Amino acid sequence: MNRDIELSISCTQCVRRGTPDCADCLVSFVLGDEPDSLELSSDAARLASLISAEGLVPTLKFVSTPSRRG
């Protein structure tokens, strides 16, 4: 079974951190209140996508903070 990381989310880089969207996000559902990050293998990412599409768990609400250019 392939265990390579397919999905890596850094919650500290999400503009929705600490908002109601954060509380209703797949990452918070899996890890609890205001997690730091989540990494999923490709198999786990496909499973998470399937069960969230069926409404069994919240969807991923991650939105990356804009990068700052100097």
Image (cartoon, helix red, strand yellow):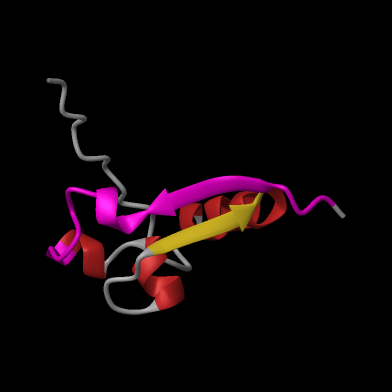
Q: Position of residue 68 (x, y in %)?
A: 15, 28
Q: Can you name the residue that lies furthest to the right here? A: 1
* Residue 50 location (% of width, % of height): 58, 53
Quarter of the view holding residue 55 = bottom left
Height in image: 16 above or below 25?
above
> What is the x, y in percent for residue 11?
31, 57
Q: Position of residue 10 (x, y in %)?
A: 37, 53
Residue closer to the observer: 22 or 3: 3
- Residue at 41% across / 61% down in the picture? 37
The quadrant the N terminus occupies is bottom right
The vertical placement of 24 against 46, above or below, is below
Q: Is residue 35 left or right of residue 3?
A: left
What segment carries the magenta color?
Answer: 2-20
In the figure, is residue 43 to the left or right of 15? right
Viewport quadrant of the C terminus: top left
Residue at coordinates 38% horizontally, 55% vertically from top-left? 59
Q: Residue at x 30, y 51 (%)?
A: 61
Q: Residue at x 48, y 68 (%)?
A: 56
Check if residue 47 falls in the magenta segment. Answer: no
